[in-house]
Image (cartoon, rainbow, N blue to C red):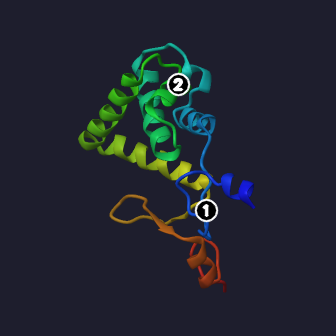
Amino acid sequence: MADVLASVPAGTSRTSPRRQRRLMSREVVQTVADFYQLTSDVLIGPDQSRRVSWPRQMAMVMLRRHTQLGVSAIASALGQQCHTTVVYGCKQVAKRREQSADWDADFKELDRMLLQRRGGVEFVRHCHAHGRAFQTVRNKKNIEQQGGQNGRPNQ
């Protein structure tokens, strides 16, 4: 009994009925690399061009949000030498998200993709509202109660 409780990751409730799994750093890096049409080797590599630095900074933020890694471990996972690079990258992403709706949309889409990999929520895509596609978050439990997939009742 003691080793079963010890295997539960820190910060999660032992009685929680829906426990989301933690993502591995390589899963986050691969998802970000795929989103920006790069390879994970390029994302982790020494290239400092804008084409790679912005996705790398997004990977830093996503690693902070979806793993329990500290900034030093994130720097190591992304092939960086110093943890201050991660701190700077996270600040840059926050700054750019405020400046541009496109960067904010990229952030939200990556976050959605990673949440979906964790198995936490299901996203339902709707046609269009106000000229743009939008999506609604619904718990799987609510969808099952409605009796259908993608939030639509069975007919």
Look at the image and tell me whether residue 39 can be seen.
Answer: no
Which residue shows up at 62% across the image and 58% down it?
A: 119
Q: Which residue is mark 2?
A: 78
Q: In the drawing, what numbered circle is on residue 19?
A: 1
Q: Amino acid at mark 1?
A: Arg
Dot 1 falls on a residue whose secondary structure is: loop
Which residue shows up at 67% across the image and 53% down it?
A: 6
Q: In the drawing, what numbered circle is on residue 114?
A: none
Dot 2 falls on a residue whose secondary structure is: loop
Residue at far bottom of view: 155
Q: Is residue 102 above or below residue 59?
A: below
Residue 21 is situated, as x and y percent measured from the top left of the image, at 62, 53
The one of 89 and 16 positioned closer to us in this rendering: 16
145 on left or right of 94: right
Q: Quadrant of the N terminus?
A: bottom right
Mark 1 vs mark 2: which is more N-terminal?
1
Q: Is residue 127 above or below residue 108?
A: below
Q: Would you identify the image quadrant in which residue 54 lies?
A: top left
34 on left or right of 97: right
